[in-house]
Amino acid sequence: MNFVEQHINLQSEDLILNSLRGLYWEKHDALIISDLHIGKSGHFRKHGIQITSNVQTSDLKRLSFLISHYRIRQLLVVGDLFHAEMNLDMHEFNQWRLAHADVEIILIKGNHDRLNPEIYQNFNITCRNKDLLIDPFRFVHEPYSETDVFSISGHLHPGISIQLKGQPRIKLPCFQVSKSYLILPAFSLFTGLNVSESDSETKYYAFTESSFFEF
């Protein structure tokens, strides 16, 4: 699987961004992602909108690749692992979870994570309702702008609009970094992009399959 990496240092910690939409923290053998939205396509189909499940399958294949590539011990999901209620898409996730039973999954619940507690238990997922502190970071679903602890979050599906030389303007997903937080791109490809105006106090690490672009 083709991908590229971008090494960064935050709070004196070495981290690796990758174009498959994950963040690797080698010190803790941890992969950090956000907004996987398992069950989203099934939720749409349940309401009469015919959406293929291929996107979820592709998302889980990328996640499996990253788990294998980095040989992680822990998967931290900063919200919206699931999208809605139980549906047929959960069977595919269950098979995926069984294939990665040795990986500890910790979910910091997002606004879409509304399943019954026993379902998380059956999937062997540890849940935190608000946040998770692992020095020097606070892991939380929605961006946390307080400066006492640097936060790593998701929720916004950040993107940036750019124009490369000789090319039309395009929108790319990105990792958004300020002095007090990092916002992850949505891991699922079945999400929109929240494109905002860039500012001088924020870095944007936009990416394609083969390149990173820092703004």
Image: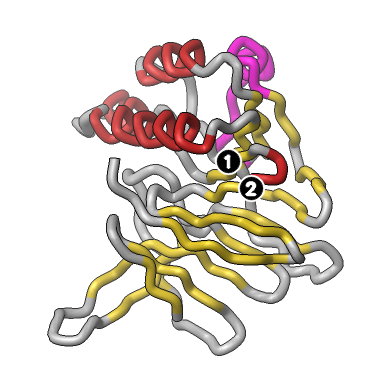
Q: Position of residue 157 (x, y in %)?
A: 46, 57
- Residue at 54% of width from left, 40% of height from top? 80
Q: Disc 1 marks which residue?
A: 31
Q: Evaluate if marks 2 and 1 touch, with contact meaning CB atoms under 8 Å apart.
A: yes
Q: How crowded is mark 2: few (under 14 residues within 10 Å), some or many (20 or more)?
A: some
Q: Mark 2 points at which residue?
A: 25
For the residues marked 2 and 1, what is the alpha-carbon distance in whole angstroms? 6 Å
Q: In which quarter of the image is the N terminus?
A: top left
Q: Which residue is at 71% across, 62% downward?
A: 144
Label number found at residue 15 = none
Residue 70 shown left or right of residue 26 in the figure: left
Whether residue 114 appears in magenta in the rendering, the answer is: yes
Instruction: Give, as a three-letter code, the residue at label 2.
Output: Trp
Farthest residue in the bottom direction? Answer: 200
Q: Where is residue 202 in the image (x, y as percent from the top left)?
A: 57, 79
The residue that appears at 36% across and 64% down in the rendered structure is 207
Residue 35, compared with residue 196, is above or below; it is: above
Using residue 16 as the reference point, say whether residue 106 is left or right of it.
Answer: right
Which mark sits nearer the N-terminus, 2 or 1?
2
Please state which amino acid type lies under the numbered disc 1: Leu
Compared with 83, 89 (above or below) is above
- Magenta span of residues: 110-125
**Quarter-of-image position of residue 27:** top right
Locate residue 195, reporting x and y percent.
40, 71
Q: In which quarter of the image is the C terminus?
A: bottom left
Work out whether residue 180 or residue 26 is closer to the camera in this orientation and state it: 26
